[in-house]
């Protein structure tokens, strides 16, 4: 007959003394895991969103540079220019943007126009917004979102640029050619990220214009 004292101590422990987790401990661990996983997911989502935003801004900026280069070619060819608010059929400002009218002789410059209407560039408010504009180009004499060729979007008001007025005619100095000043601020989120505006600016001479007296 074996006595209790001869049995290994591990065999004499009551089953209730076995190690384990309580329900409260399990809940605490699950909550902590949820917090950690949430932080990781949020970090990945923020990084992905930032990368997409950076890529979109780079694309917009590259497009705007190409548009400025195209605009430079038209302005170089012009003999005169007029920048004014876009007008309706009755000659009243539409309040939707500005138009740059360039006088270009038919067939005068290769690749500019073979029409007699010159070249027009216009800014058009997108969706009635007062901060987001798209820019269009036409040789038909009617610059609008429906009749002209789309060039670039997300051009906004910035600094001295207001109401989509991206063109101006600086005072002409004696002995120099008249020029057109262009300022195109680009920003996909001008309201939420005003400090992310990228502005392209240039002053371009009209090479076929008469010398200023």
Image (cartoon, grey):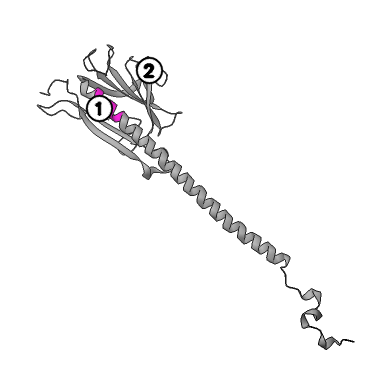
Q: Residue at x 29, y 30 (%)?
A: 68
Q: Quadrant of the N terminus?
A: bottom right
Predominant SS along the magenta part: helix
Outermost residue on the right side: it is 1
Q: Nearer the viewer, residue 174 or 92?
A: 174
CA–CA distance between discs 2 and 1? 27 Å
Query: Percent from the top left, x then y, of residue 93?
Result: 36, 22
Q: Nearer the viewer, residue 28 or 118?
A: 28
Q: Residues within 10 Å of mark 2 (few under 14, many from 20)?
A: few
Where, by quadrant of the figure, is residue 5 drawn? bottom right
Residue beneath label 2, please? 88
Task: Name the residue: 14% across, 20% down.
Answer: 210
In the rendered image of this protein, does residue 106 appear above or below residue 86? Answer: above
The quarter of the displayed image where residue 138 is located: top left
Dot 1 corresponds to which residue?
Answer: 72
Residue 8 as seen in the image, left or right of residue 61: right
Label 2: element kind: loop
Residue 117 locus on image (x, y percent): 29, 13
Q: Nearer the viewer, mark 2 or mark 1?
A: 1
Magenta-tinted stretch = 67-74
Magenta-colored stretch includes residue 138: no
Say few, some or many: other residues with alpha carbon within 10 Å of mark 1 (under 14 / 14 to 19 / 20 or more). some
């Amino acid at each position: 007959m074996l006595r209790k004292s001869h049995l290994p101590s591990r065999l004499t422990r009551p089953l209730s003394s076995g190690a384990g987790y309580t329900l409260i401990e399990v809940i605490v661990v699950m909550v902590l895991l949820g917090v950690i996983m949430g932080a990781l997911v949020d970090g990945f989502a923020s990084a992905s969103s930032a990368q997409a935003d950076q890529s979109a801004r780079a694309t917009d900026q590259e497009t705007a540079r190409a548009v400025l280069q195209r605009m430079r070619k038209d302005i170089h060819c012009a003999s005169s220019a007029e920048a004014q608010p876009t007008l309706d059929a009755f000659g009243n400002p539409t309040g939707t943007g500005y138009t740059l009218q360039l006088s270009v002789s038919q067939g005068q410059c290769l690749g500019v126009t073979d029409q007699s209407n010159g070249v027009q560039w216009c800014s058009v408010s997108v969706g009635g917004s007062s901060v987001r504009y798209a820019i269009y180009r036409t040789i038909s004499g009617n610059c609008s979102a429906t009749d002209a060729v789309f060039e670039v979007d997300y051009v906004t008001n910035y600094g001295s640029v207001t109401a989509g007025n991206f063109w101006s005619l600086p005072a002409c100095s004696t002995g120099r050619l008249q020029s057109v000043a262009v300022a195109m601020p680009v920003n996909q989120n001008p309201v939420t990220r005003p400090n992310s505006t990228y502005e392209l600016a240039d002053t371009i001479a009209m090479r076929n214009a008469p010398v200023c007296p």
